[in-house]
Image (tube, rainbow, N blue to C red):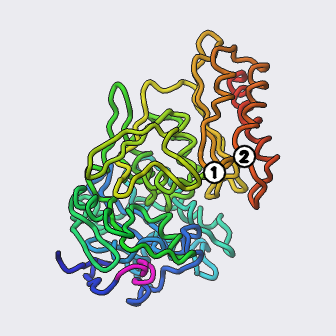
């Protein structure tokens, strides 16, 4: 394999000897690029944000902001990175830096380089200038303790179009970096899916996509897998196909890519995405990774359960399809066999017309849910023809509320029916008291979620 090289702010650097657990943030700071900071080490504060050149949707290449504290440094091999230092100089500030400075968007400055990179990703987003809208969610993963957000938002909204000749804007018109195979101690990026499956057969090998979960485990819990096998670039895992019968979503697509490529084709998922962590996390997190961790508080599983989704699993022995309702077997346990990968998630069509996702958390955005409830309901002539309810945060695994579903199907969509089904919904799972919520609160939120959905349909 070729010597691992990475382009940082236009200069080429070698990554020889750089291996896990070193993160991209560790390595960038070690070469003197200390603008990016470590604040939380779990992808919540955004102080470590940097830009990566990635395959685009509306342009050949798009600048994507990611949390450098989570990405293994070895994964930068063959990539193009821009840090806050690479955007401008003290006597020639980048427009993002200039607007933050003149509008008072920085005080202590610790978080500023991260804001700069996240804001720059949105600045260069294809279509932003045409729409005239700066998406505030682009900054949702960046925290500031002293400035306050008003001047930061004002700086973002004051940005115009990139100037003619802006080299980072011009870079988006060229193909993205070519992904090349890499093998260093503790990290491998195979060239093909077959090679990845072979590597995953090695003792201690685990798949790596966005690193938004594995990175946290490494930083905060000192997790040290024997081998990280990068799969996020594999073509077979990056497909998205809509047919007459189903929507099939590749497991290695980031949530941002899925949201943009689906373009509203699955309304229930459109309700989930804005509430799923932050844009920085969604730029890395994948649908396969979210299911692979098997967390009982993940946001996607309840929605996918309500959509009656299945997972397509692949191994050297072949492919099999497992209904998601049968996929989770225990706390962070699944039917996945050694050497097996989630290849895609399959959502059957047609979709139920009435869908909703209720996430109850202490913060509106960028927080872990205390309870997540997803609904997919079809009502024909005032009678519930089908109902699926996915629940998260109230059992050892994400579950379907089958008893409540049965009380709805075949019955009129009325307040009386909803109240009775809501009582059964509140009895679902095994809610516990913890630091996020009490068991009684969780039961009340589940019951109220169904009644809230009903009142919204009556009001409309």
- The answer to whether any part of residue 58 appears in the image is no
On residue 210, the disc is none
Element type at marker 1?
loop
Q: CA distance from mark 2 to mark 1?
A: 8 Å
Residue that sits furthest to the top in the current view: 381
User: Which residues fall within the magenta stretch?
Assistant: 19-27
Image-based side of 136 in relation to 240, left or right: right
Q: Residue at x 25, y 75 (%)?
A: 183
Is residue 130 found inside the magenta-colored segment of the image? Answer: no
- Quadrant (top left, top right, bottom left, bottom right) of the C terminus: top right
State the residue position of label 1.
396
Secondary structure beneath label 2: loop
Residue 443 sits above or below residue 234 on the image = above
The location of residue 283, given as percent across then percent down, is: 44, 58
Query: Disc 2 marks which residue?
Result: 430
Work out whether residue 5 or residue 58 is closer to the camera in this orientation and state it.
5
């Amino acid at each position: 394999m070729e010597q691992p090289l990475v382009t940082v702010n236009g200069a080429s650097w070698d990554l020889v000897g750089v291996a896990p657990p070193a993160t991209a943030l560790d390595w960038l700071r070690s070469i003197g690029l200390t603008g990016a900071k470590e604040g939380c080490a779990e992808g919540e504060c955004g102080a470590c944000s940097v830009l990566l050149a990635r395959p685009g949707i509306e342009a050949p290449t798009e600048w994507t902001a990611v949390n450098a504290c989570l990405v293994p440094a070895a994964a930068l091999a063959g990539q193009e990175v821009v840090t806050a230092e690479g955007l401008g100089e003290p006597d020639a500030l980048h427009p993002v830096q200039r607007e933050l400075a003149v509008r008072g968007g920085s005080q202590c400055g610790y978080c500023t380089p991260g804001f700069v990179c996240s804001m720059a990703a949105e600045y260069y987003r294809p279509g932003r200038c045409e729409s005239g809208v700066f998406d505030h969610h682009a900054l949702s993963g960046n925290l500031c303790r002293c400035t306050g957000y008003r001047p930061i938002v004002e700086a973002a909204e004051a940005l115009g179009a990139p100037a003619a000749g802006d080299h980072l804007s011009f870079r988006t018109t060229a193909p993205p970096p070519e992904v090349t195979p890499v093998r260093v101690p503790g990290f491998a990026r195979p060239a093909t899916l077959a090679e990845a499956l072979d590597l995953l057969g090695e003792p201690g090998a685990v798949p790596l996509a966005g690193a938004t979960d594995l990175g946290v485990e490494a930083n905060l819990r000192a997790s040290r897998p024997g081998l990280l096998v990068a799969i996020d670039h594999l073509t077979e895992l990056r497909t998205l196909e809509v047919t007459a019968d189903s929507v099939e979503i590749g497991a290695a697509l980031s949530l941002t890519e899925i949201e943009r490529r689906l373009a509203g084709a699955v309304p229930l998922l459109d309700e989930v995405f804005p509430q799923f962590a932050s844009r920085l996390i969604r730029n890395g997190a994948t649908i396969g990774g979210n299911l692979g961790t098997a967390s009982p508080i993940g946001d996607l599983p309840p929605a996918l359960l309500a959509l009656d989704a299945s997972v397509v699993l692949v191994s050297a022995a072949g492919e099999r399809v497992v209904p998601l309702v049968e996929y989770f077997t225990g706390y962070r346990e699944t039917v996945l066999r050694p050497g097996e990968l989630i290849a895609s998630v399959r959502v059957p069509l047609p979709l139920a017309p009435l869908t909703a996702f209720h996430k109850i958390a202490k913060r509106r955005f960028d927080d872990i849910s205390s309870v997540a409830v997803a609904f997919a309901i079809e009502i024909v002539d005032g009678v519930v023809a089908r109902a699926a309810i996915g629940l998260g945060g109230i059992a050892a695994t994400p579950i379907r509320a089958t008893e409540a579903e049965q009380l709805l199907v075949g019955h009129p969509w009325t307040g009386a029916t909803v109240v009775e089904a809501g009582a059964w919904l509140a009895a679902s799972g095994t809610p516990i008291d913890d630091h996020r919520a009490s068991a009684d609160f969780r039961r009340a939120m589940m019951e109220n979620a169904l009644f809230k959905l009903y009142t919204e349909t009556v009001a409309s």
